[in-house]
Amino acid sequence: QSKLTPTSLLLQRAKDILFPPPIRVLSHNVWWKNEDMDNVATHLTQPWGYVEELTCLQQCLGYDVACLQECTGTFLRMLDDKLPASHTLWAAQTCGGRYWAVLVYDRNRFEQIDVPWYGCFKLNNGQLDKGRPAVAGVLRDRRLGRYMIVASVHAPHYNDTPYRLSPNLAHFMREAL
């Protein structure tokens, strides 16, 4: 068994900087093709495993950040109950919509910087779309000290014409900072 020495710590830090560990992200529309919400919640709280019951997620290689769209209140409560203490959950139900945008991250890997921002997509005419919630915030990677903006967004589909994706994403990022 190796001992932690100043030299071994320095070598590990250099390795992390030269070969940064990947950030594993799961983005998933929970409502779409998932009739059994309990299986989805279980899947998301078991970061290393294989869950055959899920039709749209065949393998889970673990995640550092999970962005979930179209979550119901029931699913949100289930997920919150099943999350290990090492994970934090942000949830946005904004502008009067019935679904939630959820972001879950591993606190062992990331530190939350400031408070998350909660909002929703804007139509081209500037009105808020109650069916498109978003949550965004800034996290610091504890291993590398790098900062990143993360967002869980229920983005419109390419054929939804009253939206423009880029201005909305830019708005979310500005608000998160």
Image: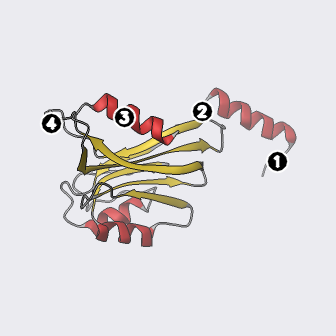
Q: What residue does disc 3 label?
A: 169
**What residue lies at 28% left-to-right and 32% top-to-bottom?**
165
Q: Is residue 142 above or below residue 31?
A: above
Of the residues tagged 3 and 2, which is closer to the observer?
A: 3
Secondary structure beneath dot 1 equals loop
Q: Is residue 77 above or below residue 153?
A: below
Instruction: Tell me which numbered mark, 3 or 1, is placed earlier along the sequence.
Output: 1
Residue furthest to the right: 6
**What residue lies at 29% left-to-right and 54% top-to-bottom?**
95
Instruction: Tell me which numbered mark, 4 or 1, is placed earlier along the sequence.
Output: 1
Instruction: Tell me which numbered mark, 3 or 2, is placed earlier along the sequence.
Output: 2
Amino acid residing under circle 3? Leu
Secondary structure beneath dot 3 equals helix
Of the residues tagged 3 and 1, which is closer to the observer?
A: 3
Q: What residue does disc 1 label?
A: 4
- Badge 3 local density, few (<14 within 10 Å), some, or many (20+)? some
Image position, residue 21 (x, y; %): 57, 37
Measure how far apart labels 4 and 1 are at the Cα level. Answer: 55 Å
Q: Is residue 27 above or below residue 98?
A: above
